Amino acid sequence: MKLRVKEICKDKGVSISELAARINIHQESLSRVIAKNSTSTANLEKIASALDVPIAELFEKPNDNVFQCPKCGTTLQAEIK
């Protein structure tokens, strides 16, 4: 799952460096967390708390009607009738 930290920061008017200061880590470390889409639960809790959002908001919501072909990577939209 993709982290939405940058998007949430933008919506709240918070820079990545300001968020890093709020959670007491280096900006470079936070940037790596965002780029790699992986971190500890403790860091996710700190980030969510600093941004005043539930942890679930940090993750991109899956679109149940969109699929990606595992062979070619083509994105397919399924229409439910």
Image (cartoon, helix red, strand yellow):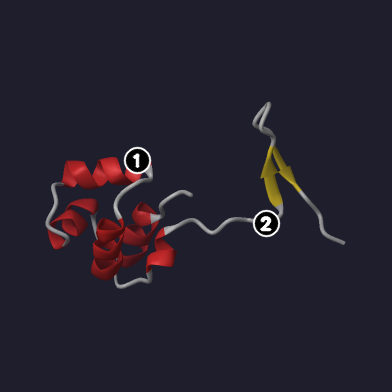
- Check disc 1 and report its element: helix, strand or loop: helix
Please count the marks in the image.
2
In the image, 6 versus 61, the foreground residue is 61
- Residue at the image point whose x is 58% and y is 56% from the top: 62
Q: Is residue 35 above or below residue 70?
A: below
- Measuring from the top left, give residue 66's x and y in whole percent: 68, 49
Q: Secondary structure at mark 2?
A: loop
* Residue type of the residue flagged with mark 2: Asp
Q: Is residue 22 left or right of residue 1?
A: left
Q: Note whether 74 is above or below 19 in the view shown.
A: above
Identify the residue at the far right of this view.
81
**Earlier sequence position, callout 2 versus callout 1:** 1
Q: Residue at x 18, y 54 (%)?
A: 20
Position in image of residue 56 (x %, y %): 43, 65
Classify residue 23 as left or right of residue 9: left
Return the x and y of residue 42 as percentages of the image width and height.
25, 60
Q: Quadrant of residue 11?
A: bottom left
Q: Residue, x 14% and y 52% (percent of image)?
A: 25
Residue 76 lies in what quarter of the image? top right
Q: Residues within 10 Å of mark 1 (few under 14, many from 20)?
A: few
Give coordinates of residue 53: x percent, y percent: 35, 71
Of the residues shown, which amino acid type is indicated by label 1? Ala
Locate residue 64 relative to residue 54 in the image: left or right: right
Instruction: Report, in whole angstroms, how far the alpha carbon at label 2 lies from the one at label 1.
Output: 24 Å
Rate crowding at label 2 as few (under 14), some (14 to 19) or many (20 or more) other CA atoms within 10 Å.
Answer: few
Label annotation for residue 64:
2
> Which residue position holds label 1?
35
Tag shown at residue 26: none
